[in-house]
Amino acid sequence: MFFPDTENSVKLGREVTEDIYHFEENPMLDCNQFIINDKSTGELALFDSGNGLSLKSLFEGMNNLGLDYRKITKVFLTHEHVDHVLGLYPLIKTLKSNPPELYAYGETAKILREGIESKIFPGNLGISPKMFGLEIIPLDVKILNIHETINIGSEFTFNIYYTPGHSQGSICYYESNKKILIPGDLVFTGGSFGRYDFPGGSLDALIESIKFVNNLDVKYLLPGHMGISDNGNPQIDYSYKMVQSIKSFF
C-alpha cells in the first residue's frame, strides 16, 4: 500500500467557531482533527490523533493559526482504529517532557492500555505499524464514563454518549450550548456514515446510534472524515435515511 508523503505537507486548518479549530485529514488512512483552545489557561485539547504520519503536518497547520502544539495537554479519542489513534505514539514521544493526558471509553481504552495491535488495525487491511514507522505499546489512558461531562475551560462542556456500530469503542462528544457534535466515524456529511463491516461493527447498532444523535440539537457536525458542516441536523438526518435504506435490502 502506498502512503503519500504527508510529513512535508501542511494540514489545512480553520476556526469553526470561536476557539474550536478543524484540521483536514490527509490522504490515506488519516482523519479530521479538532482542537479546542482553553482561553483561561492557554492549554489545547485535541480530538483524535490521526495516523502518526500526519503529525508534523498537523503541527505546521496549527502554527499557521497561531496554535502551539506544545500546549496540547489532553487528547480525547472517538474510537480505537488506526487512523484515529496512531498519532498518540509520536505525539507522546514529541511531548515527552510534558505528555498530554489521554482519554478514551470502554473498548478503546482497553485496547490502548493493553497495546492490542490487532484491534487497532481492523480487518484484513494489509497494513501494520511498521508501515507507519511505529510500535504499538501499552499507553496510560484515562477511562471515560458514559454521561459524564468534560469541561474545557469555562466555555465548553461536552457530554459523552456511547454510539457503537462502527466499532465497539465508538463514542460521540456533544456540546449542547454551542450545539457541537464530534461523532468520530459514526456519521459523515453528504449522507455518508461509518463502515460496519469491521470486527465489532454492526449495521443494527449503527442505525440506532445515528438515530440517537439525530435527536440531538446539532449545528456544527465535526466528523472524522470528509467535510464538516454548520448545518448539522439535516446532514445527520440525510445519513440516517441512507443507512435505513441499506437495512431494507437485508
Image (cartoon, helix red, strand yellow):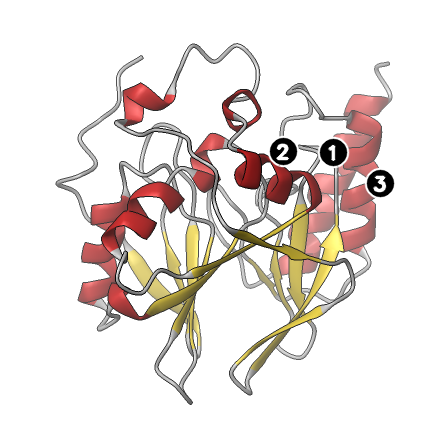
Residue depicted at 46% across the width and 40% down the height? 85
Q: CA distance from mark 3 to mark 1?
A: 8 Å
Instruction: Determine the residue located farthest toward the left in the rendered image.
Output: 8
Q: Point out the tag, 1 or 2, that comes first from the N-terminus.
A: 1
- Badge 3 local density, few (<14 within 10 Å), some, or many (20+)? some
Q: What amino acid type is highlighted by mark number 3? A: Glu
Q: Is residue 176 in view from this perspective?
A: yes
Q: CA distance from mark 2 to mark 3?
A: 13 Å
For disc 3, the marked residue is: 208
Asked which secondary structure carries label 2, the reply is loop
For disc 1, the marked residue is: 165
Mark number, residue 180: none
Q: Is residue 11 in view from this perspective?
A: no
For disc 2, the marked residue is: 194
Residue depicted at 57% across the width and 25% down the height? 119
| Callouts 2 and 3 close, C-beta under 8 Å | no
Q: Is residue 151 above or below residue 226?
A: below
Q: Residue 208, position in %: x, y?
A: 84, 40
| Callouts 3 and 1 close, C-beta under 8 Å | yes
Between 78 and 145, the one lying in front of the other is 145
- Badge 1 local density, few (<14 within 10 Å), some, or many (20+)? many
Q: Residue 113, position in %: x, y?
A: 55, 41
